[in-house]
């Protein structure tokens, strides 16, 4: 891993250098086409940077931060929109907001009692659970297929939430501003709309809304009924998310796309659009499922489609095994020597 860590550091030095150019030079160019043109070389560099890495975990976070988040934020920045529209107070703020999964809160809650807080013991329990999952994953050959799927879903959720939460805590500590939450108990989702729009990886929702959803909705509103315009915007948003995930998977597997993950998001886009339309009719007639039933249906659909379309590319190419092997090293280090610090952070 020594050589991989060295390449990882070089990748991020390159990324930070590019963002310095954006802050000191591109920001002085008038917003619009000219600024976008000045940023195109930077966007190209970000796209090719993950190809220098081979570690699944390092590729996943680098491609998510630089290729997805940074590129979309810089696209918005080209037209003075998004989290970079208000000039950050210094270069450190600009680089952090551009390249990390954070968006500063514009309007902190006036009542501190309304701020969502999670007990520290729950965060520590999540770290411990991830460590157990990583350890148990060494014995997959002796496990039931359905139990393995539960392990993978838990691993995906906990690994992502803990890693992003750790980054968020440190950024808040260093930069001193509040950050929008990244997750909101996705396991309590009562519908697909609730899951994708209000609970799961909210950073992506906040980025796709101004870059895809709002523009498509405005365009179609002038052409068709507003309801159809909203549906078209939702479908376009899921399609773009699917294509970006397909790119992330290509970085991880380095094999030709099978488009399964794109189909996964298109399917969820269609189902979410239908769900929204059905809920409007149902609410007008006073029909509503009990939350326990709707949660079970939503989770069952997510698990089934994830196992069918989302995970196969990763499993076929052994990405899951490589990622878990790396997590075993990391978790062993964290649990033995850094657990108290992680406990405080989360």
Image (tube, rainbow, N blue to C red):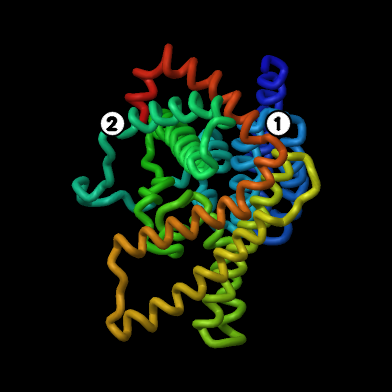
Say the numbered circle drawn on residue 14.
1
Quadrant of the rendered structure where residue 54 is? top right
Quadrant of the rendered structure where residue 309 is? bottom right
Element type where label 1 sits in the image: helix
Tell me the quadrant of the picture where the N terminus can be found. Answer: top right
Q: Label 2, label 1: how many angstroms apart (C-alpha)?
A: 36 Å
Say the numbered circle drawn on residue 278.
none
Q: Position of residue 204 (x, y in %)?
A: 53, 52
Q: Nearer the viewer, residue 78 or 63?
A: 63
Q: Residue at x 72, y 61 (%)?
A: 33
Q: Residue at x 29, y 63 (%)?
A: 291
Residue 289 seen in the figure? yes
Q: Nearer the viewer, residue 103 or 295?
A: 295
Q: Residues within 10 Å of mark 2 (few under 14, many from 20)?
A: some
State the residue position of label 2: 120
Q: Position of residue 201 (x, y in %)?
A: 48, 49
Q: Is residue 268 left or right of residue 168?
A: right
Q: Is residue 210 left or right of residue 255?
A: left
Q: Residue at x 54, y 55 (%)?
A: 207
Q: Position of residue 329 (x, y in %)?
A: 55, 18
Q: Position of residue 144 (x, y in %)?
A: 52, 39
């Amino acid at each position: 891993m020594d050589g991989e860590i060295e390449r990882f550091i070089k990748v991020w030095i390159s990324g930070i250098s590019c963002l310095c150019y954006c802050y000191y030079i591109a920001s002085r160019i008038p917003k619009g086409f000219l600024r976008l043109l000045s940023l195109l070389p930077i966007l190209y560099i970000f796209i090719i940077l993950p190809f220098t890495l081979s570690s699944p975990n390092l590729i996943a976070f680098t491609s998510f931060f630089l290729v997805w988040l940074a590129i979309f934020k810089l696209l918005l920045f080209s037209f003075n929109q998004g989290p970079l529209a208000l000039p950050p107070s210094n270069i450190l703020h600009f680089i952090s907001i551009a390249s990390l999964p954070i968006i500063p809160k514009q309007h902190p809650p006036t009542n501190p009692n309304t701020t969502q807080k999670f007990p520290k013991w729950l965060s520590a329990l999540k770290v411990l659970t991830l460590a157990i999952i990583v350890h148990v994953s060494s014995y997959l050959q002796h496990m039931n297929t359905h139990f393995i799927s539960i392990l993978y879903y838990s691993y995906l959720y906990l690994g992502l939430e803990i890693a992003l939460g750790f980054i968020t805590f440190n950024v808040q500590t260093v930069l001193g501003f509040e950050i929008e939450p990244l997750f909101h108990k996705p396991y309590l989702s009562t519908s697909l709309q609730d899951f994708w729009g209000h609970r799961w990886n909210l950073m992506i929702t906040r980025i796709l809304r101004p870059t895809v959803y709002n523009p498509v909705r405005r365009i179609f509103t002038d052409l068709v009924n507003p309801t159809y315009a909203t549906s078209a915007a939702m479908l376009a948003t899921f399609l773009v998310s699917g294509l970006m995930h397909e790119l992330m998977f290509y970085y991880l597997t380095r094999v030709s796309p099978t488009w399964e993950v794109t189909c996964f998001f298109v399917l969820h886009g269609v189902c979410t659009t239908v769900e929204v339309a059905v809920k409007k009719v149902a609410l007008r007639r006073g029909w509503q499922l009990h939350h326990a039933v709707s949660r079970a249906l939503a989770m069952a659909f997510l698990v089934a489609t994830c196992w069918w379309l989302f995970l196969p590319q990763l499993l076929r190419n052994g990405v899951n095994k490589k990622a878990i092997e790396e997590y075993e090293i990391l978790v062993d280090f964290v649990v033995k020597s850094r657990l108290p610090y992680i406990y405080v952070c989360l």
